[in-house]
Amino acid sequence: METKADYQKMLISQLREWNILIIILEEQAQYAGEDIKLMYVHEIDEIKGKQRYALKKVEELEGASGYAWESAKISMDMAGYDLGTGLARAITKFI
């Protein structure tokens, strides 16, 4: 079983990696034609919303302990899954 500190460390690492992928998508969008650029912008906006939600869940984790931490961890896992699948879909579509 992982500790709270281990989980937070892994989570921050994953969020940084996903942020790099978002930056790559933003850079790709700059070189796309107008039609494709609009699709990029829409996808990136969706992904950034999921990223903001995941970051909010990280903040909740930091202050939680006991049962509240377990509950916040489950919420974060779901938010991370949602963000990760959104990014994977966008990368598959555009890159």
Image: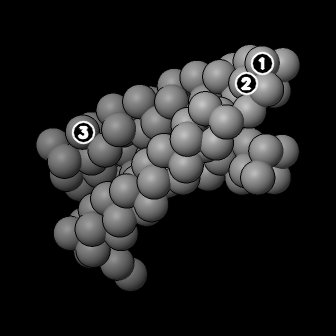
* Amino acid tagged 1: Glu
* Amino acid tagged 2: Lys
Q: CA distance from mark 1 to mark 2?
A: 5 Å
Task: Determine if residue 16 is in view.
Answer: yes
Task: Locate residue 67 relative to residue 81 in the image: left or right.
Answer: left
Q: Residue furthest bottom?
A: 1
Q: CA distance from mark 3 to mark 2?
A: 32 Å
How many C-alpha atoms fall within 10 Å of the one at disc 2: few (<14), some, or many (≥20)? Answer: some
Task: Determine if residue 11 is in view.
Answer: no
Q: State the image quarter where residue 27 is shown.
A: top right
Q: Which residue is mark 2?
A: 37
- Vertical arrangement, residue 38 with respect to residue 50, above or below: above
* Amino acid tagged 3: Glu
Question: Percent x, y for residue 43?
Answer: 69, 28
Secondary structure under the numbered disc 3 in the rendered image: helix
Residue 59 marker: 3
The number of numbered discs placed on residues in the rendered structure image is 3
Q: CA distance from mark 1 to mark 3?
A: 37 Å
Secondary structure under the numbered disc 1 in the rendered image: helix
Question: Percent x, y for residue 22?
Answer: 53, 44
- Vertical arrangement, residue 34 with respect to residue 28, above or below: above
The quarter of the picture where the N terminus appears is bottom left
Q: Residue furthest left?
A: 63
